[in-house]
Image (cartoon, rainbow, N blue to C red):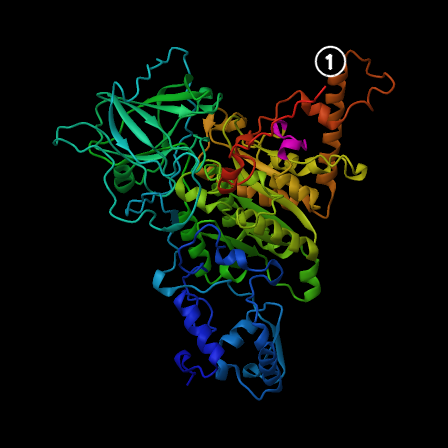
Amino acid sequence: PFPSPQLLTDPYESFMHHHLQYYGYFRASIEPLAQGSLPQIASHTHELGTSPPASEVNADSAGVPTIHQDNKPKAKLLWILLLEGSLQIRELKGSLMLEAALLKSKQLLFSHLEGPGVRRLREPRGLFAVPISQGPLQAPRWPVECEVIEEQIQHIEWVPPEPEPFYQPTGNEPVPLIVGQAKGTVVYRIRPAAAKGSYFTCSRVGGAQGPIMSRAVSLEGPEDITLLFESRFESGNLQKAVRVGPYEYELTLRTDLYTSKHTQWFYFQVRNTRSDVTYRFSIVNLMKPKSLYSMGMKPLLYSERDAQEHGVGWRREGSDIRYFRCSSEEGQALYCLTWTARFPHDHDTCYFAHFYPYTFSDLQRYLLALTSDPVRSQYCKLRVLCSSLAGNTVYLLTITSPSRNPAAMAAKRAVVLSARVHPGETNGSWVMRGFLDFILSDSPDAQLLRELFIFKVVPMLNPDGVIVGNYRCSLAGRDLNRNYQTILKESFPCIWHTRSMIQRVLEEREVLLYCDFHGHSRKNNVFMYGCNNKSSPAQRLHERVFPLMLSKNAPDKFSFHSCKFKVQKSKEGTGRIVMWRMGIPNSYTMESTFSGSTLGRKSDSHFTSEDLKSLGYHVCDTLLDFCDPDRSKFLQCLSELQDLLQQQIHGKLQELGHEQDSAGAWSDLSLSDMESRRSTSGSNSSQSDGLPAHLNVTEKVPQKQKKKKKKKR
């Protein structure tokens, strides 16, 4: 029989057993994770200033606990006994000392249970044990200021049978007069989750303690037609609703937590609907002067009754759509999105959203299906990269086929993909879903890709922001995609560990491609931002080949002419530029519109979630073209790029008034000059740059200015 953990004779092991058991880390075995469970961070209340467990893992040790200095000789003795065959592993099962030693994934394991002299490399283990009592999924952790309802919101996936066309503005759409709560009735208001100047301190499952109060107005009877609003669920965002007419409501969105900016993402529930009337909704505190809603984009509507009775999910809905400037607040111009809509059923529960939601729990359900699949789990290994500020898990997937020998494995190049650094850009998760669906399929192309590459995938870089319904920032109150150069490991753990992981991969092998999946709020179609390799003449234009190939594989979705390859000083902290400077020449940000396509057969129609998933497949298809030993496609694209550049230079010279054959004129122009005429339309995150919110407080303390001494004459 195995020794009971409670009967440990070694005083140190006995002490550590009770210590780890108290904090929820102890498993008392070296069995693999239970089938149908995800690797998780052990349950605890995480406070700022005390690192999340995974953040304390040394990057070089890949999550291996450090053996206590006093016990290193004993650990070494255990290994000697094992190698000599005088001690069996089963005799030490339950020993913390042995478990710590076996966790080292680079350690050769000599197993006498499998026959004499059998050597094998121990498979990497999850960084933390799975608390079986919590079930297979990790419950989301919220800042303690956030109220969270118990209801778990989940939607079906559905693809409209016909394309959903853009709304065609007439120019005569009415502009409602914004009156506010002074002349209206507040029917829903949640207390501010974070006061001005506050910062994240601690988190817990379920958010705020105590009973959850109803924040919606109470109905006076069955004939009361007031809509009931709710947003205190995963990824939800609605701060306040004011009824200004029988069927007209003004809505206020919550800013990103611990900031006063970034109102773009919305996702809320509406109950007590009526089907025979037209409602008007106006979101009154948007901050971007330009929007795809001015170009025909419609909001998304979901009906629970339609989903249950007809299998119909999210669909585009809205008429009389208008986006306009409505007011100013503390010097900040505010804009309004207004639209009318009709609900399909009486007394239904419906949802409105900016784009197809994809929550942290959605990701965990998908990953659970992967790890439970006996086939896909053979070439997809799920690990915990780190934990976020709130203690939520940041997952890392490693996808590749087993190699015949170590030399073949060492020769494999790597591809690194990530998504959801900006939580409101759910587009990225749908593209990532499509990529994972294909790369883990039994398609011959997928099998070939797994044989050629090692894929490192971080599917959700900012789980905290996703959970609380932020649009752009983490709980540090900052844009993570401006902090890839950070040394503040405790404030930006997700970014710090991602960069560290990629650095370790670069030390082992070539990284062929890095791509971060994003969403774009002001341009249609899908396109990429890359980095101009102008310092390497031999690689001239090579960074543009992959996007051009992708545009050929997805001609009705991807626009090469919208791609940019400038390295701007304001974007130095982005993942794209930092990875490029680390030595990955093919480093990209893929931007997918919130709206739809203006290209080919999909022109003037909205993207569905299935359209975005198809982009993930096209990324895989383009990888095969890009790495084809037959270089004809690559060289053809390179030739097209050179011709395109020549045409652009001719046009630029004409603008400057130069003759096309004038001496020196060509050398005076660079690739950046070719793009200077076209706005990058990139996001301005200068409002979210700088120190994290909790450190920024001290920066705002007014400093006493020294009095200048008057010079004596």
Please state the horizontal and vertical placement of residue 150, each as a whole percent of the image. 28, 48
Please state the horizontal and vertical placement of residue 236, each as a whole percent of the image. 36, 38
Q: From the image, tell me which residue sits under label 1.
A: 655
Determine the residue located farthest toward the front in the rendered image: 713
Viewer-proximal residue, 235 or 69? 69
**Quarter of the image where one finds residue 669:** top right
Determine the residue located farthest toward the right in the rendered image: 663
Query: What amino acid is found at the position of numbered circle 1 in the picture?
Result: Glu
Sort mark 1 into few (<14), some (14-19) or many (20+) by Cα contacts within 10 Å: few
Determine the residue located farthest toward the bottom in the rendered image: 86
Left or right relative to 32: residue 527: right
Please state the horizontal and vertical placement of residue 654, each as a whole percent of the image. 76, 13
Viewer-proximal residue, 421 or 22? 22
Viewer-proximal residue, 526 or 243? 243
What residue range appears in magenta?
561-571
Viewer-proximal residue, 168 or 192? 192
Relative height, residue 141 to residue 517 (above, below): below
Point 44% across, 68% down: residue: 20
Relative height, residue 2 to residue 440 (above, below): below
Left or right relative to 673: residue 516: left
Classify mark 1: helix, strand or loop.
helix
Please state the horizontal and vertical placement of residue 244, each as a whole percent of the image. 25, 20
* Quadrant (top left, top right, bottom left, bottom right) of the N terminus: bottom left
* Number of on-image labels: 1
Point 16% across, 32% down: residue: 219
**Quarter of the image where one finds residue 294:** top left
Left or right relative to 479: residue 131: left
Magenta-drawn stretch contains 388: no
Relative height, residue 414 to residue 173 (above, below): below
- Residue 94 visible from this viewpoint: no
